[in-house]
Amino acid sequence: MDERRALEGTLTVATFRSLGVHLLPPILALLRRRHPGLQVRILDGTLGEGGEQLVQDGRADVAFLELSAQTPLLTQPVIHDDYVVVCPRSHQAGPLTADMLQAQPLLLFPQEHACNATVHRHLQSFLPPDMVVQEIAEDEVMLSMVEHGLGLAVMPRLAVLPLRENLMVHPLPVPLPRVLGIAIKPGRTGLPHLRAFTEALRAYQATPAFARLQALLQSA
């Protein structure tokens, strides 16, 4: 393969909003600086069966996703995160219990989206089946509903950043950590455009900005 020609082609990346906002842009900035002729197309990795299926089907070259133990794809961890409960700042101080979560409706991302199924299963493991749940696709809408006292949101910590001034976060009563990373189809990692992308990713991981983001996720 002509490497120069490949780097003038198109790289298709599947992602979801929080990674698309906080992680992908600095990586793409480094990629463009090194390979200005490479075009990047972004796909929504939350729809249908998610980014993993997009890569397997060949519709995406690489996907950002929550890494699981069972996948035929080659994966590389990128950043650690966890799920939190988002409450108004006027909410009772101190750790949240399962009983406290049941006192208000829970606001969650839709379960039919592949990347959200894990948190739904996790909550079902320790909350009663009649728990009131409202599914909302847009995180900004969900946060606004929390601000107006319409429920408590369970979201990835990364999706909450930057935290609104009148909101606060608590750990889940039963923690749910996650590892975010990239997934590539076996046999494709040596392709020039994918090699260029992973090099840009590693370069960003070595920057102070990435270290600050990871520290913020551990302390927010």
Image: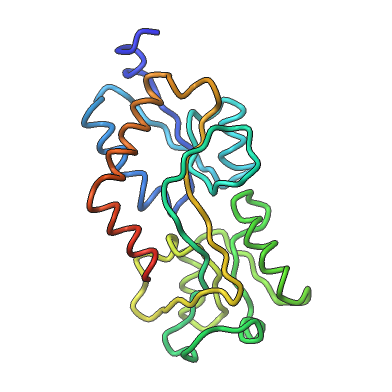
Residue 95 location, x and y as percent?
Answer: 52, 85
In x, y percent, where is residue 55?
Answer: 56, 31
- Residue at image point 29% right, 52% down: 210
Q: Is residue 76 above or below residue 180?
A: above
Tell me which residue sits at (23%, 28%) in the image. Answer: 34
The one of 126 and 106 positioned closer to us in this rendering:
126
Residue 161, quarter of picture: bottom left
Q: Quadrant of the N terminus?
A: top left
For residue 27, side relative to residue 71 (left or right): left
Q: Residue at x 67, y 72 (%)?
A: 133
Rendered image quadrant of residue 100:
bottom right
Q: Is residue 163 left or right of residue 57?
A: left
| Residue 80 or residue 158, whichever sits in front | 80
Q: Residue 111 versus residue 81: which sits nearer the camera?
A: 81
How far from the left and from the top, in percent, is residue 124? 72, 68
Looking at the image, residue 206 lies above or below residue 62: below
Please, which residue is most extreme toward the right here? 129
Classify residue 26 as left or right of residue 170.
Answer: left
Residue at x 40%, y 48% (from the top left corner):
20
Q: Which residue is at the front of the view, 108 or 31?
A: 31
Residue 98 placement (x, y as % from top left): 65, 81
Number of marks in the image?
Answer: 0
Quadrant where the C terminus sits is: bottom left
Looking at the image, is 61 positioned above or below residue 212? above
* Residue 5 position (above or below residue 32): above
Q: Is the image coloured rainbow, by chain, by secondary structure, or in one colour?
A: rainbow
